[in-house]
Image: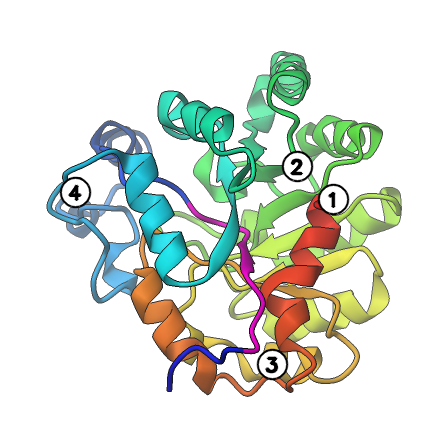
Amino acid sequence: MTRPASWPGAVDTMIGFPTDHRALYDAMRRQMLRDSGSQGMAMPAEYMFNDVPHRDGVPDGDPVEVTLEEMDAHGIDVGLVSVSAAPEVTERALRDHPDRFVASYTVDPNRCMDQIRELVEAHERHGLRAVSVFPHGVQPQVPIDAPLMYPVYAKCVELGLPIFITVGVAGPRVPSKCQKVELLDQVLYDFPDLVVVMRHGAEPWVEHAVKLMVKWPNLHFSTSAFAPRYYSPAIVDYANSRGADRILYGGYYPMGLELERIFAELPHVGFADDVWPKFLRHNAARVLGLA
């Protein structure tokens, strides 16, 4: 199947640029990963993906233009990019293409108030649309409901920014209990105005994630890091019923998935006709405050 002509231009809630990530991945291998298998992987969760984009090096050409070409080829109008990753490239993309890219900022709660001050500075500089956190990916790990997270949540509410939180079993071979979906229940009780988007699947606690979305009106789910053929039936069923406004499209280019694969598989997902515009564009536009 090809991309239906009726689909709107998408907002991708997780996209980046094909730059050299070896220094980042090398640091993760030294600091976090203990098994021998992870030491030989191009990226820490490579075992989960058949074909990591640009595994053997970055493509020729400007990385911003490479990503823009991919977006144009697959009908993506706007991409959410982290200014914490490849900042020189990302800042240039935000400056030169403000209609195509919007900024998020990835926090390390271990850095306490220094991180809060840098978050505010990033917001003032880039006009952030979101904050993101990987509980499993900081040292030491910080659980979703840990006290160190609470200043970040409070600042997000104050600034009116949604926070994207990685939930479920981590891709890299590190412990995952810091990302149990059930931990969101206390957070959303304590911060009823906080807008949260779950990232990276929530497996094996997807049904629990759906229950929490039914319960908490500000909780959402992004499909990032999952090829469409592996979208959970529980998520598809929820989107087709009472959750049409809660499920957001998220890719994983160039970290783990090619856009070509994602958009070749998307038409086979069983979303109802009226769900597609919300899933691809309108839900993310609302959460990110886009016009």
The residue labelled by disc 3 is 236
Name above or below for residue 113 compared with residue 287: above
In the rendered view, does 44 fall on the left or right side of 190? left
Residue placed under numbered mark 1 in the picture:
289
Element at label 1: loop
Disc ID at residue 129: 2
Disc 3 residue type (three-letter): Val
The range drawn in magenta is 6-15
What secondary structure is marked by label 4? loop
Give the structural element (helix, strand or loop) at label 3. helix
Dots 1, 2 in contact, CB < 8 A: yes
Q: Residue 210: horizontal and vertical position, in percent?
A: 70, 72
Disc 4 versus disc 2: distance between alpha carbons?
28 Å
Residue hosting label 4: 59
Foreground: disc 3 or disc 2:
2
Left or right of residue 16: residue 157: right
Q: Earlier in the sequence, mark 4 or mark 2?
A: 4
Q: Nearer the viewer, mark 3 or mark 4?
A: 4
Amino acid bearing label 2: Arg
Going from the N terminus, do you reach mark 1 or mark 2 first? 2
Q: Is residue 25 visible?
A: yes
Q: Can residue 255 be seen by looking at this rendering?
A: no
23 vs 222: above or below = above
Q: CA distance from mark 1 to mark 2?
A: 7 Å
